[in-house]
Image (tube, coloured by chain):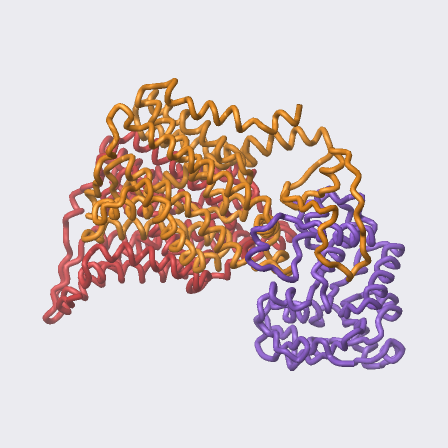
Chain colours: A red, B purple, C orange
Amino acid sequence: MHLPSANVLIQVALVGLLTGGVYALMAAGLTLIFGVMRVINIAHGAFLVFSAYITYWLFTNYSLDPFLSVIVTVPLLFIIGIVIQHFMLSGVRNEPGLTVLLTFSLAIALEGIMGTLWQSTGRSIRTWYTSEVWQVNIGELTIRLPVVRIAGFMAAIIALVLLYLVLTRSDLGRAIRATIQNKDAAQLVGVNIAWVQALTFGIGLATVAAGGALFSLIWTFNAGSHEEWISKMLSVIVLGGMGSLPGAFIAALIMGLTESVAAVAMTSYISPIVFYLILFLTLIFRPQGLMGTVIREG
Amino acid sequence: MTPLLHTENLVRRFGGITAVNDCSIIVEEGSITGLIGPNGSGKTTLFNLITSIYKPDSGNVYLRQKKITQVPSHQLCHQGLSRTFQITRLFWDLSVLENMIVPVRQVGFRSLLGPGMHRYEEVRALDLLERVGLEHLKNQPARKLSFGQQKLLEFAAILMSEPDLVLLDEPAGGVNPTMIRFIMDLIRSLNQEGVTFLVVEHNMSVVMELCDHILVLDQGQKIAEGPPHIIQSDPIVLEAYLGD
Amino acid sequence: MGRIIRWWPLPVLILLLIYPWVYREPYFHVLGFNVLLFATMATSWNIMGGYTGYKSLGHSAFFGLGAYLVAIAANQLGWNPLWSSPILALVVTLVAFGLGWIMVRTSGSAFVIATIAMLLIFRLLALNLRGITNGAPGLSQPLPPWTPEFSRMPFYYYMLIWLIIAVATSAYIRHSRFGLGLLAMHDDEGKAEMVGVHTTLYKVLAFGVSAYFVGLGGGVWSYFSTHISPVFAFDIIVGVEMILMTMLGGLGTVWGPVLGAFIFIPASDLILFQFGSTTIHLAILGGLMIFILLFLPRGILPTISHWLEERRTPRTAHTGARSMAEMQDKRSAAVTSEIKPAGDYDPVIINNKQETL
């Protein structure tokens, strides 16, 4: 393990934090879905890739900038989410192993469909700004941050703030939070649980649509990428505490930071192993993560 | 008479609420001891602490003077302690007979790989089932039994491990008077055979008639104890139940 | 009639024995081997996933581990995989005991995710510990010594033997005291703990045993394929297919996983052949899983048996603790049993008959 210079370290740390913001947006929906429905949506990664593909398709065929294509992808995935929850998940006994298998199968099916439609070529979106770098000099330090990551971070923050406002200020948000805390009690005070669950799943996928737009600008992907990304997202929400939005945010930032720093400080192959090890150990020894409620399941 | 079970200064908090607050009780061997108190006084929590479902924040539990705090539940069963649950718990997809066979007092590696049921186990199970009047249902899945039958099955099953101390959580709850009588007779006859009971019960007439010693809990603490006739007229007890 | 049906494995076994001679092309031998391989592994998985209900999604970790152990032993030590596989599978089992001991503290979804993480960690280790595993390009091992025209047949028969052993093990467990405990735990783990079942030990044991035949399968597969690589050895889809087959045939039954494999593998091959693309295959696989999970969650065998038995008296889990009196009714033999009063039992074997159910 060799330590790079302070300059490189700071730069890398900042980039890591910026990346973490995007991770947070991607994982927000996942933790929300778990909080409301106790469902671990393994297909979340596949939907991330799916929205990235749609974004890519809109970009290559209609020159629609990814930041704008959310106008299309977010409502689209919102509706898809409601449909999936209503027709597929609601009818199934909420036995945890069962829902995991179901969403996993969905992920596989999606991977197959996407792979058939778009083959295995790695895709990524290159706009006029994707190679731009913003440079700032502070004293002796020269910090160079990719514009895309900065923009991505800011977009993620805006989206998360919007989500937060919806959850705290709207009636739906209140219903969602009530359901997270105590489903039965919420039902007794008149919350329509079926609707809340369907809408939450829709919101969950909608956020991942937004995440997908950013994702397509920063990383290269193909149909098989979802596996790597769902593992990352699971690590984030497990670490942050499943069901906790603030927890996911903090965990995402930590993940982004450590991943980035570890990549330069250690040999690069350690970092994915680190992700999974953190996931594994957290699940075993501290399943409630940083801020979530203890998973008390059968 | 020696204490079969005793707790020492048990404390258990849930967030801001202290469910069990410095609770020290004694259950004498050979007795039928009642545990009563208003709702929320900590009775079931106490049971859960004794049977290692919850970990106490402080304090200890002793079985025959030996500390059993936090000993894994299955080992408690091996040491002769059994319990029923307020909401009946059975193995719903297994048959009545299979439910009877699962409880074990002693299992070594060799018997693990042995047959699902030995002859002597079946005989004992059928005998117990006959005693509670369920023998004719031995091959029915547990979920098909009526509520009262399920309660009896739960009771009969835990007897299979030949416990020395049985914790009963509301045995008369939700059950018709004839069945209550039946359960009380069963408890009494088992007690005569040497089984000690600690019974949580809300039905006062059952408690007063059945128990030879009563412990009263309020807000997680023992506020009174004694034989039924004393407890019945104890002003502290009455106040706990009726409030201010 | 029921008596005759009880002996159905025998004609099936004969059919399986002569199959490679009737169908001579290598393709059929490969197909047959795959069916037997997956039937064995699904049966193994079922011991944990079906009996206890803890569904491991990462079981291919053990498949890959077995494959690599056998390949490395073949290269470094000259061990022939046919006899090293069963032995090295024991190593896999030990690893499973260790990992299982850590993982069974969790429950439900946490366990499933932990098994996925476990698989991914194994794969990454295989990719990166290049000194041992040769990394991404993978490992080759020496070809089998027998003549090319018989190239696949020995594998077929070898796997058949292990399938029989695996099924026998599964059946034995299911009808033993251990199996009764597993099924009780599946029903209500807390209650089982409370009546004296050492749940942690049971889970770890089940997990370890469930890894054995999967590890063994991996070892045989590595010999069969000659060349293995991390991506294929630690492929999550292999584990998923084990689950799918088990659920298709009947989760928690002895023969369900076998039936599932016999249906699924040929069907899967047909689909691959028909469409020629692995991505369509993947899409169909996912869709099939969804279909089974939604509409046939119990699987074929339990659905049939449930249907048959609703017409007679409803039965239950058919553990070893089935009433002997009930079985003896059928033989209309009079059993004089001495029922002793409660509290006075010694393990007297009545009528000198100790029946193992």
Left or right: C5 with respect to A107? right
Residue B210 versus residue A208 in the image, above or below: below
Relative vertical location of residue A165 with respect to residue C68 in this rendering, above or below: below
Which of the pair C124/A296 is nearer the observer?
C124
Residue C56's spot in the image, x, y percent? 44, 47
| Image x and y of residue C155, in percent | 34, 32
Residue A159, visible in the rendered structure: no
Question: Relative to A230, is B29 above or below?
Answer: below
Which corner quadrant of the image does residue A135 belong to?
bottom left
Q: How many marks?
A: 0
Q: State the quadrant of the N terminus of chain A.
A: bottom left
Give the residue at the far front of this rendering: C352
Q: Is residue C261 above or below residue A241?
A: above
- Between B230 and A32, the one lying in front of the other is B230
Across and down, in percent, residue C2 comes to 66, 26
| Image coords of residue B86 (percent x, y) | 72, 60
Displayed quadrant of residue A3 = bottom left
Residue shown at the point (14%, 59%) measured from the top left: A144
Question: Position of A232 compared to B71: left or right?
Answer: left
Q: Residue at x 66, y 44 (%)?
A: C355
The image quarter containing residue B105 is bottom right
User: Which of A127/A86 is in front?
Assistant: A86
Q: Residue at x 54, y 48 (%)?
A: C52
Q: Could one spot residue A15 in this view of the protein?
A: yes
